Amino acid sequence: MRLQHGFSLVEVLVTLLILKVALLGLLAAQTMSLRQLQDAIQRTQAVALSHSLLSELQANRQLANVIGQQLTISSELPPAPDCTPPSQCNLMQIGANQLNNWFGSFQSTAGGNISNPTMCLQSQGPSFLLQMSWQQRSAQSPQDTASCYAATGRSALAVEGGGW
């Protein structure tokens, strides 16, 4: 009987197979965690944008009339009037200025982190319901961007504020 030194080819192949399966599992977990992180970043940005718009609405309720019912990244805005002294602006003109200022941050934030965002605003008596949807980064093809509701490949949130 001879003493065995080293490993046989079959043992090496089985070890490599086990190592390969383990590494593929780690790679899949890493990919899944990156998708979850991207979704969390999008949701955080959406909440921040929603709350900033509700704060603007709290400062001037006429802003709701300027916004209308739906706002997307490609929405056309009313021209911002010149409200420098000695001229004075009414609340609608101030709302147009507010919307133009807020929309600049909306475009820069949405362009970087949120894909195809859509915001819908509904007045509910003294309060507002603000709904927002966006395309998930993991979605394979562009989805309908006209809706403020969650759908396949789109996430959504709704924030209610007001009663001021």
Image (cartoon, helix red, strand yellow):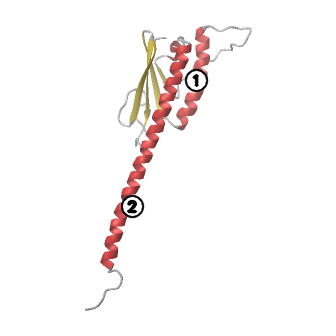
Measure how far apart labels 2 and 1 are at the Cα level: 46 Å
Q: Counting other residues with Cα less than 10 Å from the Cα at mark 1, is it few (<14), some (14-19), or many (20 or more)?
A: some
Q: Residue at x 35, y 85 (%)?
A: 5
Please tell me which residue lies in front, 83 or 29. Answer: 29
Rendered location of residue 39, percent (x, y): 44, 39
The kind of secondary structure element at disc 2 is: helix
Does dot 1 land on a helix, a strand or a loop? helix
Residue lying at 28% horizontally and 91% vertically, measured from the top left: 2
Q: Amino acid at mark 1?
A: Trp
Residue 35 in view here: yes
Q: Any mark on residue 102, and which? A: 1
Residue ID for mark 2: 23
**Quadrant of the frame with the N terminus:** bottom left
Left or right: 135, with 93 as reference point: left
**Residue drawn at (51%, 12%) of the image:** 65
Quarter residue 133 falls in: top left
In terms of depth relative to the viewer, which is nearer, 57 or 111? 57
Q: Nearer the viewer, mark 2 or mark 1?
A: 2
Q: Can you tell which quarter of the image residue 146 is in? A: top left
Residue 61: % across, % down: 52, 11
Between discs 2 and 1, the one toward the N terminus: 2
Residue 76 coordinates in the image, percent (x, y): 55, 22
Residue 136, by quadrant, is: top left
User: Looking at numbered disc 2 in the image, what kind of residue is underneath it?
Assistant: Leu
- Name the residue rendered at 43%, 44% in the picture: 35
